[in-house]
Amino acid sequence: MLHLSTVRGAGVVVREGLDARILRNTTSVYELAGAAIRSGQSLAAEIARRGLGETVDLTRAEFDLPVSHPDPAHLHLTGTGLTHLGSAAARDAMHATLEGAEALTDSMKMFRMGLEGGRPAEGEVGAQPEWFYKGNGHAAVAPGAALEAPGFAEDGGEEPEIAGIYLIGPDGTPHRIGWALGNEFSDHVTERVNYLWLAHSKLRVASFGPEILVGALPSDLRGKSRILRQGKTLWEKPFLSGEANMSHSLANLEHHHFKYDIFRQPGDLHVHFFGTATLSFADGIRTEPGDIFEIEVADFGQPLRNTLTFAPKAPGICRVHPL
């Protein structure tokens, strides 16, 4: 399998197996992917044409975002929820209905729609998933950097996910660069108050990487999500993803994102988070500043690590100045 990463001081690095080497004559993964689209070649072919240089030890590397856009406003962070088998249980507990045991919450209704129609036949359109917007490239945090919750946040919680990374070609066609580990950082306390506050809870920074897996995503991904506090493991749980563990097909989720013209603008970069069934918040964990989130799946190589911080509370309210 081919893996791509961006290492500080080295540039774009290609890994096959245990061998990680600098990709020659390459300024960024964004530039590499654009060249592959223009030439009509695969990423593997474009990489082979450029050639590899010096070896890099990824276990000691400092990583930048594996891919970024020259203009952060043209990188879109988005996601879908209630896509994984078992993911509705934690969400439904947060959005408990007051209508009686037999009444379904909106979360359970959405989850059931995915179970019944999230895997359409080839050429058909399946059920729409829950969709949300997280921000643009200004909200993208490099592996190893801090995930900062805003001062008004009620919580800062991890969401271990797989993210798809896409570059829109000159004719508006989405091209998938590959897949990465993602921490779709959210405010679960705010979301729990009312599911209509989901949009507010998702407007947070997020991290992805360090490595991009190029090619097909394995159908059964198994790893660990953990929280470290003061050098010790506070919480750890298995992390499952891939289509074998999902109620929606990846193609269905991709369709319902890119069916919108606004998301097919040439040159734009998209990082789309595909959901999770594993949350420390669902197990009663309350995170604290200084906690370290760690997400690892063997197929992706190096784990994704980020430290939790909180911004100071802003004095007063945010006022708009008329012109």
Image: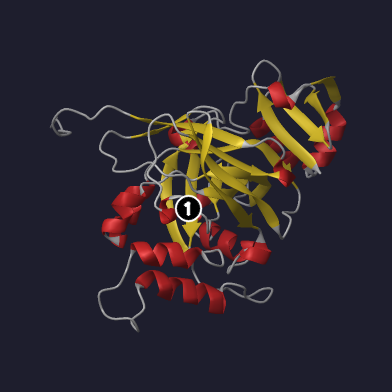
Is 60 located above or below residue 138 in the figure? above
Image coordinates of residue 282 in percent, x first then y, are 42, 56
Q: Residue at x 52, y 55 (%)?
A: 278
Image coordinates of residue 316 in percent, x first then y, are 13, 31
Instruction: Classify residue 144 by image quadrant.
Output: top right
Q: Residue at x 38, y 35 (%)?
A: 288
- Horizontal arrangement in the rendering, residue 40 relative to residue 177 (left or right): right
| Mark 1: amino acid | Leu
Residue linked to disc 1: 279
Image coordinates of residue 86 in percent, x first then y, are 53, 66
Q: In this rendering, does residue 270 appear at all? A: no
Q: In this rendering, does residue 100 appear at all? A: yes
Residue farthest bottom in this picture: 102
Residue in front for this viewpoint, 13 or 62: 62
Q: Secondary structure at mark 1?
A: loop
Task: Name the quadrant of the C terminus.
Answer: top left
